[in-house]
Image (spheres, helix red, strand yellow):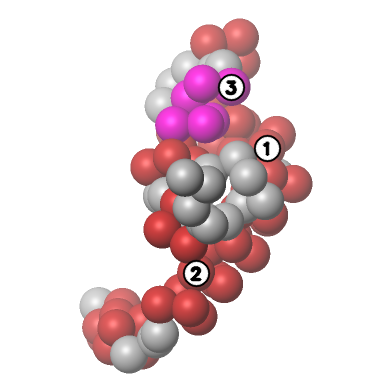
Amino acid sequence: MRVASVAFRRWFRTTAEARASVLSRMAGILRLSTLELVAWMVFELDKAWDEVDEGQYASILAYIGIGKDEGAPSSTRASTG
């Protein structure tokens, strides 16, 4: 718990731009590690390989706020309208 508390305080003081950068890097890692993430879903959710679909993977990325365009968090994407 102490480690989590220290990490939270550090993250709390991190700027929005730095957080966005971390999330963008994380999106790239997740995108490169699709097979590993799916394997964890199979293990943790007790699913068969053929039950895990791209929609579930996409929903995980959406849950943490990462869209498909360049891995940028949705809050940092440029407005198109």
Q: Quadrant of the N terminus?
A: bottom left
At 40% from the left edge and 77% from the top edge, which residue is drawn? 16
Is 57 displayed left or right of 25 in the figure?
left
Residue 57 within the magenta-colored segment of the rendering: yes
Identified by mark 1, the residue type is Thr
Contact (Cβ within 8 Å) of mark 3 with mark 1: no
Crowd tier of the residue under label 1, counting other residues whose Cα lies within 10 Å: few below 14, some 14–19, many 20 or above: few
Q: Which residue is mark 1?
A: 34
Q: Amino acid at mark 3?
A: Glu
At which x and y percent is residue 54?
59, 22
x%, y% of residue 70? 67, 51
Name the chief secondary structure element in magenta.
helix
> What residue range appears in magenta?
54-59
Q: Which residue extends farthest front? A: 81
Residue at 56% from the left image edge and 17% from the top image edge? 53
Residue 40 lies, with reference to residue 55, above or below; the image says below
The CA distance from mark 3 to mark 1 is 9 Å
